[in-house]
C-alpha cells in the first residue's frame, strides 16, 4: 500500500533525479554518471544530496532500497 508520503516522493523527484537514482542503482559512480549525462560531477553530487533529502534517507544504500520500495526502480532491469 502506498502512503501519501511515498506518492509525494515520487512526484517531487525530478526527471534528472530519477535518472541519477537509476544509474546509482546500477553501481555507477558520480564521475561515471556525470560523463554519461554530460553534466559535471558537482551537479551529480547536488542531485544526490537532493534525492537523499527528498527520500528522507541517510545514504545511497537506503536511497536505492527506498527506490525499489516506491517502484521508482524496476528489479527486472537489474
Image (tube, rainbow, N blue to C red):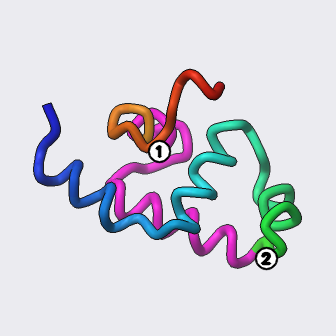
The reply, left or right, for residue 68 in relation to residue 1 is: right
Q: Quadrant of the image for the N terminus?
A: top left
Distance of label 1 from label 2 (alpha carbons): 21 Å
The reply, left or right, for residue 42 in relation to residue 8 is: right
Q: Residue at coordinates 30% horizontally, 57% vertically from top-left? A: 9
Q: Residue at coordinates 57% horizontally, 63% vertically from top-left? A: 48
Pointers 1 and 2 in contact (CB under 8 A)? no
Residue 5 coordinates in the image, percent (x, y): 17, 53
| Residue to which mark 2 is pinned | 39
Residue 75 coordinates in the image, percent (x, y): 53, 24
Q: Residue at coordinates 30% horizontally, 63% vertically from top-left? A: 11
Secondary structure at badge 1 equals: helix
When asked about the image quadrant of residue 13, the answer is bottom left
Q: Earlier in the sequence, mark 1 or mark 2?
A: 2
Residue 31 coordinates in the image, percent (x, y): 84, 61
Secondary structure at badge 2 equals: loop
Q: How many numbered marks, from 0 up?
A: 2
Q: Residues within 10 Å of mark 2 (few under 14, many from 20)?
A: few
Magenta region, residue range: 42-66
Residue ranking furthest to the top: 76
The reply, left or right, for residue 75 in relation to residue 30 is: left
When asked about the image quadrant of residue 77, the answer is top right
| Residue to which mark 1 is pinned | 63
Residue 62 lies within the magenta run: yes
When asked about the image quadrant of residue 37, the answer is bottom right
Which residue is nearer to you in this view: 26 or 61?
26
Residue mark closest to the camera, 1 vs 2: 2
Amino acid at each position: 500500500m502506498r502512503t501519501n508520503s511515498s506518492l509525494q516522493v515520487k512526484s517531487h523527484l525530478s526527471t534528472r533525479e530519477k535518472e541519477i537514482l537509476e544509474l546509482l542503482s546500477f553501481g555507477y559512480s558520480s564521475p561515471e554518471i556525470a560523463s554519461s549525462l554530460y553534466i559535471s560531477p558537482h551537479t551529480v553530487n547536488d542531485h544526490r544530496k537532493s534525492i537523499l533529502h527528498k527520500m528522507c534517507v541517510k545514504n545511497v544504500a537506503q536511497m536505492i532500497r527506498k527506490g525499489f520500495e516506491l517502484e521508482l526502480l524496476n528489479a527486472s532491469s537489474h
